[in-house]
Amino acid sequence: MDVLTLIAKFGIYFIFAFTLSAALLSVTVQNIFHAALGLAFALMGVAGVFFVLHADFLGAIQILLYVGAIMILLIFAVMLTSHIGDASVHTSNRQVYPAMILSLLLVYLLVRQIGKVTWQLKETLTSIDAVEIGKQLMGPYVLPFEIISVVLVVALIGTIVIARSDS
Amino acid sequence: MIPLNHIVVFAVLLFAIGLFGTLTRRHVVGILISIELMINAANINFIAFSRYTKASPEVGQIFAVFIVVLAAIAAAVGLAIVVAIYRNQKTIYTDEIDILKW
């Protein structure tokens, strides 16, 4: 039996639990540096979900871009701003219980609606490899691809302008 | 394979955790962390629907690629703003940054 299929049968609930607990840790923990580390583990769990769903290219992008680049950016920002590890400073505001009620209400409404929907499922599951994604990006989706390249360049220049010291 | 519903419910839970963090964090970097969690929940839905449903299988993955790029842009610009605010105001707690209020 294929290893990925075996993992998909038994291990995906373990990955779900791991990801959700890491995410919960990253939104509740006091120290913001520990929150960033929790986010790294949650993102790796999401990459595992991508691999189980046979989206290998997206899983690789997830690890490279999120766990590699965005995590380094976040940890840099945490390190550049001091008195963060100070445990006496409250890191959550006074809206904890209303926010909890709102989130649970959202979960209840969405899950109830998900239970009612019947999806139009495929007979045989397909998996797309990186070659096919590249062909589609250079074919029908070449205009959004170019636009997002321009947006990326503009955002990088803007980031440098904002973060540059005024002296 | 596991049912599609289980993956979608997992994405809903991840989104709700991100929403809770966004609403409760005082720290700007904490809010950015929670927003990344919500974006990832949306991405899981795109991948799952592209694999399971009758929609065209490439579209979901290509949308997910674009979303990852936009999330990276959001993180980079947001953290540059955090550094700039910290340099000027010496604080990054959201209830202390009120120079746009009067």
Image: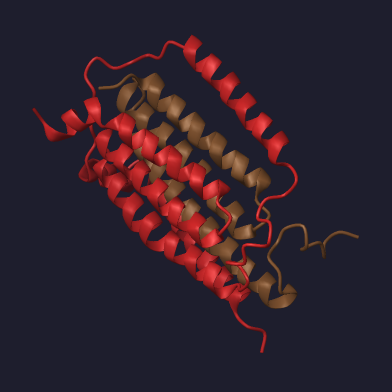
Chain colours: A red, B brown
Q: Position of residue A117 (x, y in %)?
A: 47, 12
Q: Residue at x 39, y 22 (%)?
A: B6
Q: Residue furthest toward the bottom?
A: A167
Which quadrant of the figure contains the C terminus of chain B?
A: bottom right
Compared to residue B76, the image places residue A66 above or below, namely: above
Q: Residue at x 37, y 56 (%)?
A: A67
Q: Nearer the viewer, residue B77 or A92?
A: A92
Q: Residue at x 24, y 43 (%)?
A: A56
- Judge whether residue B35 can be spotted in this image: no
Q: Position of residue A138 (x, y in %)?
A: 31, 48
Q: Position of residue B86 (x, y in %)?
A: 67, 72
Query: Within the image, what quadrant is residue A13 found in?
Result: top left
Q: Position of residue B70 (x, y in %)?
A: 49, 52
Compared to residue A113, the image places residue A4 above or below, namely: below
Q: Nearer the viewer, residue B18 or A89?
A: A89
Residue B30 in the figure: left or right of residue B23 = left
Residue A105 in the figure: left or right of residue A116 = right
Number of marks drawn: 0
Q: Residue at x 44, y 58 (%)?
A: A149
Residue A32 in the figure: left or right of residue A46 = right
Q: Residue furthest toward the front?
A: A88
Q: Nearer the viewer, residue A27 or A109?
A: A27
Query: Within the image, what quadrant is residue B44 found in?
Result: top left
Q: Residue furthest toward the left?
A: A1
Q: Nearer the viewer, residue A160 or A18?
A: A18
Residue B6 in the figure: left or right of residue A82 = left
Which quadrant of the figure contains the N terminus of chain B?
A: top left
